[in-house]
Image (cartoon, grey):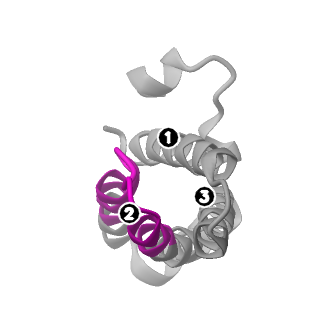
Amino acid sequence: MNELAAAEPGFTPSAVFDADALTELEGLFGRPRLMDLLGVLDREIVLRLDPPADESAQLARDAHVLVSSSGALAFGDLSSACSALEQACLRGGDIAAQLGTAVHAARHARLAIATLRGV
């Protein structure tokens, strides 16, 4: 487990993604390509949510990008959290809870990606 993951009590990288789906993706793409794709997702998370945009329309766009990219790579919690964030932004209500959930899921996804990639 990487140093960041070890610093978060109770964090289990494998609980953050669908291991069976990642195994299937590895079979389709090969391990090197899958690791590249996970690196791209990690950079997208940083770009979109670290820190999150202040303006709700931009935050909705950022969340939308992460819905599909994280979902495609078996990070269902992050995808669901970003979907809820996107919808909250589009409805124009209070987004604090959804943003907090998305940022938390993003942090866990980044920790799991680092563990998977061995960085």
Magenta region, residue range: 40-63
State how far apart marks 3 and 1 are (Cα). Answer: 9 Å
Residue 16, above or below 1 = below
The C terminus appears in which quarter of the rendering? top left
Give the spatial CA distance, label 2 vs label 3: 11 Å
| Residue position for label 3 | 78
Residue at left offset 29%, top offset 65%: 36
Q: Which residue is mark 1?
A: 107
Would residue 71 be visible to someone looking at this image? yes
Q: Position of residue 99 (x, y in %)?
A: 58, 50
The residue that label 2 is drawn on is: 41
Q: Is residue 48 magenta?
A: yes
Q: Secondary structure at mark 3?
A: helix
Q: Which mark is in front, 2 or 3?
A: 3
x 50%, y 76%: residue: 64
* Nearest to the observer: residue 39 or residue 58: 58
Residue neighbourhood size for the residue with mark 3, other residues' Cα within 10 Å, grouped as few (<14), some (14–19), many (≥20): many
Q: Is residue 117 magenta?
A: no
**Towards the viewer: 10 or 50:** 50
